[in-house]
Amino acid sequence: MLVNMRELLADAMDGNYAVGSFSVANMEMVLGVLKAAEELKAPVILQIAEVRLKQSPLEVIGPLMVAAAENASTPVAVHFDHGKTLEKITQALDIGFTSVMFDGSHLPLEENIEFTKRVISVADEYDAAVEAEIGCVGGSEDGSEDIAINCTKTEDAVRFESETQVDALAIAIGNAHGNYKSTPNLRFDILEDVEKNTDVALVLHGGTGITPEDFVRCSHTGIKKINIATATFDSVEKTVSSWYNDGKIKGYYDLQAAEVEGAYQNAKKHILIFGSDNKA
């Protein structure tokens, strides 16, 4: 069933677990994620980032994501990730997304706050949740930029929450988009301080490559939404390659099944780590 992300995050805060937010690029990935969610009775978030719309146009992938969520047997929020423009954020809301993110992490704090408030004002008309980001998560969503990590300051998070009342806040604690060159050294001291001084649901971007132990620790320290993108794409690609090598793909529909399987296995693994199974 299609739900507001706000509901999923509130339940995660009460239950001390995190909800997986899985980036998708086609129908097969959507089907794979929802297969895992329904099998494990888990709430999930389907998301797509603005930078990915060149490959998956919003007017095509968006209605598919919403329809899939509406027909799922478990709670599913549909989220527009890393929104850069009010035009595309509004388009996602018109399509029926129940959550949008404005990524103003590149802006001075004051400008980030003001633009986030504008986005919240628009999203309120649709009763949709809003996520924002402060501090700079390393890399970029599509791997095209080598953005340095700039960890979030607790006083900035406190001010941001107070002035915007945003539903979810992505913070930088040494995490980065894409594949890590080595195991990341997450700044749990920063995470603990932000959690202690704010009430907002916190979000972890750049989940690919973080250890299961660190994921669990994050989910018990204020992180209630964890984004998984690169791991999904990598799992789909590897599964397709493996099936070809094993002679399992004899035609298009075998290829389609391999893509679904890759997304399913990846989502299932992360749902179990995040502790959101049997929480639907």
Image (cartoon, rainbow, N blue to C red):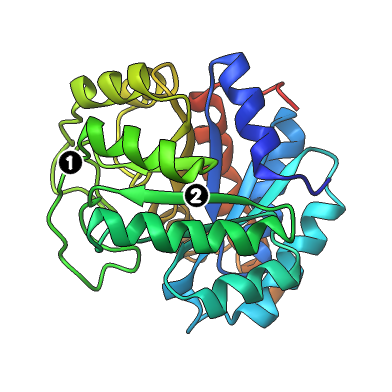
The foreground one among 158 and 33 is 158
Quadrant in which residue 248 is drawn: bottom right
Q: Position of residue 143 (x, y in %)?
A: 27, 67
Left/right of residue 224 with respect to residue 45 in the rendered view: left
Q: Residue at x 31, y 24 (%)?
A: 214
Locate the N terminus by quadrant.
top right
- Which label number is shown at residue 131? 2
The one of 276 and 87 positioned closer to us in this rendering: 87
Q: Earlier in the sequence, mark 1 or mark 2?
A: 2
Quarter in which the C terminus is drawn:
top right
The quarter of the displayed image where residue 35 is located: top right
> What is the C-alpha distance between the residues marked 1 and 2?
18 Å
Can residue 210 be seen here? The reply is yes
Q: For the residue marked with disc 2, what is the amino acid?
A: Glu
Identified at 42% across, 63% down, the residue is 115
Residue occupying image coordinates x 51% and y 78% = 53
SS label for mark 2:
strand
Is residue 258 visible to the viewer in this orientation of the structure? Answer: no
Q: Is residue 120 above or below residue 75?
A: below
Q: Amino acid at mark 1?
A: Cys
221 versus 173 height, above or below: above
Please tell me which residue lies in front, 176 or 99: 99
Q: How many marks?
A: 2
Mark on residue 151? 1
**Could you classify mark 2 by the number of other residues whose Cα lies within 10 Å: few (under 14), some (14-19), or many (20 or more)?**
many
Q: Is residue 19 left or right of residue 175?
A: right
Point out which mark residue 222 bears: none
Judging depth in this view, the residue of 178 and 48 nearest the camera is 48
Q: Quadrant of residue 78?
A: bottom right
Q: Is residue 109 left or right of residue 234?
A: left
Q: Position of residue 87 (x, y in %)?
A: 55, 80
Q: Position of residue 219 (x, y in %)?
A: 44, 23
